[in-house]
Image (cartoon, rainbow, N blue to C red):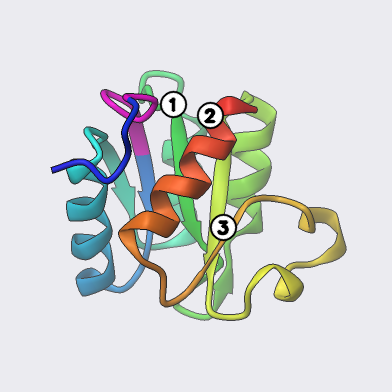
């Protein structure tokens, strides 16, 4: 059952970058409830950069956990920005914890709800 009244997220393909398996499963369920399809996941920065850079992997939006096993995710953000794919950061530190180069990017503060994901993703899709 979708939390949103419109279908802005319906059918959107998502790259999910998250190193905590339980969090990833929860986010996947939240996205599925909105009609999104997680087409690729990554748990480490190297793997995520590969997927973000691979033009054969098609996705519309991405959610990036800022800290993957102690490694910052900003190389993935750079690959996505170069490719023109909108994304949101997910972090326990909130937007204030982002480096200056990434301040102002949509951010999900952990812990977040399905409604938070819906709101942030609708904003990035709308531009």
Q: Secondary structure at mark 1?
A: loop
| Residue occupied by mark 2 | 125
| Residue occupied by mark 3 | 89
Q: Disc 2 and disc 3: Cα gap in Å?
A: 14 Å
Task: Decide: few, some or many residues near mark 3? Use Cα within 10 Å; few <14, some 14-19, many ≥20.
Answer: many
Image height check: is 66 above or below 55?
below
The outermost residue toward the left is 1
Pair 1/2: label in front = 2
Write the residue at 62% across / 80% down: 93
Q: Secondary structure at mark 2?
A: helix
Q: Earlier in the sequence, mark 2 or mark 3?
A: 3
Q: Which residues are magenta?
A: 7-14
The outermost residue toward the right is 100
| Residue occupied by mark 1 | 60
Q: Disc 1 and disc 3: Cα gap in Å?
A: 15 Å
Write the residue at 44% across / 58% down: 116
Callout 1 touching callout 2 (CB < 8 Å): yes
Instruction: Indicate which disc residue 78 carries.
Output: none
Q: In the image, 81: left or right of 112?
A: right
Work out whether residue 38 or residue 4 is closer to the camera in this orientation and state it.
4
Write the residue at 57% across / 29% down: 85
Q: Position of residue 50 (x, y in %)?
A: 46, 40
Task: Decide: few, some or many residues near mark 1? Use Cα within 10 Å; few <14, some 14-19, many ≥20.
Answer: some
Residue 13 located within the stretch drawn in magenta: yes
């Amino acid at each position: 059952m979708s939390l949103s009244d419109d279908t802005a997220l319906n059918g959107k393909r998502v790259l999910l970058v998250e190193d905590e398996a339980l969090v990833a499963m929860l986010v996947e369920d939240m996205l599925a409830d909105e009609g999104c399809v997680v087409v690729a996941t990554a748990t480490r920065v190297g793997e995520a950069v590969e997927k973000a850079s691979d033009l054969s992997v098609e996705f519309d939006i991405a959610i990036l956990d800022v800290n993957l096993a102690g490694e910052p995710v900003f190389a993935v953000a750079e690959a996505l920005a170069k490719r023109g794919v909108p994304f949101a950061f997910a972090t326990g530190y909130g937007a204030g914890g982002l480096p200056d180069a990434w301040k102002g990017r949509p951010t999900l503060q952990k812990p977040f709800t399905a409604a938070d994901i819906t709101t942030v993703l609708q904003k990035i899709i709308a531009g």
